């Protein structure tokens, strides 16, 4: 089992011989170590519809004959673009051959800007919980701080790792993310994401790390989580 970070909010995972990627924003992401043509996956998971999260989903899905797992409206949009999809909803949990997936709340927005200038509504934004063997991974998605993060943690048990946005402006900033991790989510390991990709979300992840009581792993794109 392997979980790795690739800049912005891009997370890859491998379990039971299957590979997946979350929010594959590659082209236009100067922080990533990935190239679209090199990505080999069986599944693509999407937290919400913003273009810096949907990213290169359509190209990657078609190249790999991969299945897109996403909130209902976003899955419908991806299907209209020729992707194989499995729609899910907030609170829904489903077992796949790589492990379990559960979609949970995130407080943000969700829409997709088309090339012709039109905008598609893509449902509610979400966080994603992965159940990979004996490990539980929480990709918080794009969100502000909200109290039900504690409920999500209480219901689903201790997370081995949580990928938490710290960039501010569009999501939690460092100070709110520290509260989210230490007081609400309480994972074994926190990994900062969604920062330094664009000027409005420039942050120093070391400030986040130093402010936490929880263990923090600041990953360079391409590095994997070192589980306890």
Image: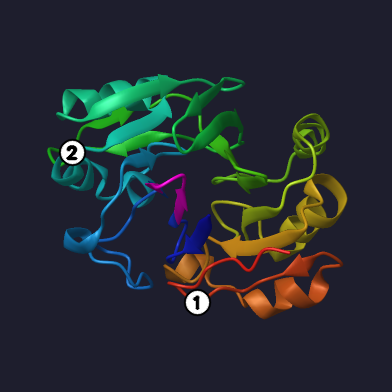
Point out residue 81 in the picture as x, y percentages from the top left corner.
16, 30
Q: Nearer the viewer, residue 69 or 170?
A: 69
Q: Does the segment drawn in magenta span residue 204?
A: no
Q: Nearer the viewer, mark 2 or mark 1?
A: 1
User: Label for residue 68?
Assistant: none
Q: Is there CB contact under 8 Å for labels 2 and 1?
A: no
Q: Residue at x 78, y 60 (%)?
A: 178
Tag 2's secondary structure? loop
Residue 117: which disc? Answer: 2
Q: Quadrant of the C terminus?
A: bottom right
Q: Residue at x 87, y 67 (%)?
A: 213
**Residue 72 quadrant:** top left
| Magenta span dominant secondary structure | strand
Mark 1: few/some/many CA within 10 Å (<14, 14-19, 20+): some
- Mark 2 nearby-residue class (10 Å; few <14, some 14–19, many ≥20): few
| Residue placed furthest toward the front | 16
Q: What is the tally of numbered marks visible in this picture?
A: 2
Q: Is 36 left or right of 143, judged from the image as shown?
A: left
In-image side of 82 versus 88 (left or right) = left
Marks 2 and 1, how far apart in space?
34 Å
Image location of residue 79, percent across then percent down: 22, 24
Q: Position of residue 78 (x, y in %)?
A: 25, 29
Label 2 vs 1, first from the N-terminus: 2
Q: How is the image coloured?
A: rainbow
Q: Which residues are magenta?
A: 12-20
Does the rendering let one see residue 210? yes
On the image, the x and y values in percent for residue 49 come to: 38, 37
In this rendering, the answer to whether 7 lies above or below 13 is: below
The disc at residue 220 is 1
């Amino acid at each position: 089992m392997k979980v790795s970070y690739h800049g912005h909010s891009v997370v890859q995972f491998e379990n039971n011989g299957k590979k997946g990627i979350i929010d594959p924003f590659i082209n236009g992401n100067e922080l990533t170590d990935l190239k679209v043509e090199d990505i080999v996956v069986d599944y693509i998971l999407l937290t919400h519809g913003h273009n810096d999260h949907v990213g290169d989903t359509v190209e990657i899905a078609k190249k790999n004959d991969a299945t897109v797992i996403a909130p209902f409206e976003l899955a419908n949009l991806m299907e209209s673009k020729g992707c194989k999809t499995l729609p899910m909803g907030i609170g829904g949990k489903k077992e796949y051959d790589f492990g379990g997936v559960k979609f949970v709340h995130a407080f943000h927005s969700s829409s997709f800007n088309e090339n012709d200038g039109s905008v598609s509504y893509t449902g509610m934004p979400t966080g994603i919980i992965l159940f990979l063997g004996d490990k539980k991974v929480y990709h918080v998605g794009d969100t502000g701080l909200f109290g039900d993060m504690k409920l999500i943690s209480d219901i689903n048990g201790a997370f081995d790792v949580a990928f938490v946005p710290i960039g501010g402006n569009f999501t939690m900033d460092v100070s709110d993310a520290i509260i989210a991790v230490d007081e609400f989510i309480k994972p074994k390991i926190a990994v900062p994401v969604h920062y330094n990709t664009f000027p409005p979300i420039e942050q120093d992840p070391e400030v986040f790390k130093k402010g936490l009581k929880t263990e923090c792993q600041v990953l360079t794109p391409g590095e994997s989580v070192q589980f306890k």
